Image (cartoon, rainbow, N blue to C red):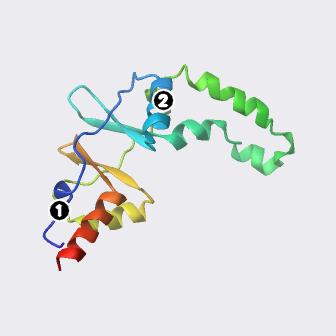
Amino acid sequence: MSDKSVKDIMSTGVRTVTRDTPIKEVVSLMCLYRFSGLPVVEDDNRLVGIIAEKDVLSRLFPSIEDTMQGLANFDFDEAAKDYRSLMDKKVGELMANSVKSVSPDMPILRAAVYMAMNRFRRIPVAEGGRLVGMLSLGDVHKALFHQSLSD
């Protein structure tokens, strides 16, 4: 396993979105294909961010101020209605602009540790700032399993 790198196990057929993609389209993809997040790229496939379920849903959660004052005054029904208004937004309004990635040449276990330290289940693979794939913990686990069978 020590000679294998991220490029050997990553997924290359990655679904991406742009800053101008409507949130409604992103949420549809997330719900239909069970994506927890999607890379955001520019026309040249330059990785510029990531849009995750938490980026959408966190807009509905109580603020720290609400929590400190107690949730008795927080209107959960109104927050649920606000979800509809999020569908009119674009990815660029909700996405995380700072995105962590791994390189295709990184050893698999090093990438897995990096993912675990950041609590990521999947991470973009980038080379020269351009998206070349995605790596999931499932990809790592499958590679480890196959390696254990061949030893």
Q: Quadrant of the N terminus?
A: bottom left
In this image, 24 relative to 101: left or right?
right
Tell me which amino acid carries mark 1.
Ser
Q: Which residue is mark 1?
A: 5
Tell me which amino acid carries mark 2.
Ser
Could you say where residue 105 lies in the image, as x and y percent from the top left?
15, 58
Helix, strand or loop at label 2? It is helix
* Label 1 neighbour load within 10 Å: few <14, some 14-19, many 20+: some
Res. 41 image quadrant: top left
Residue 25 versus residue 142: which sits nearer the camera?
142
Could you say where residue 75 lies in the image, as x and y percent from the top left?
80, 35
Q: Which residue is mark 2?
A: 28
In this image, 41 relative to 130: left or right?
right
Name the residue at 22% across, 44% down.
Answer: 12
Helix, strand or loop at label 1? It is loop
In this image, 11 relative to 79: left or right?
left
For the residues labelled 2 and 1, the Cα–Cα distance comes to 33 Å
Could you say where residue 15 lies in the image, as x and y percent from the top left?
31, 35
Name the residue at 17% across, 54% down.
Answer: 7
In this image, 70 relative to 6: left or right?
right
* Label 2 neighbour load within 10 Å: few <14, some 14-19, many 20+: few
Name the residue at 86% across, 44% down.
Answer: 72
Residue furthest toward the bottom?
Answer: 151
Q: Which of disc 1 and disc 2 is earlier in sequence?
A: 1
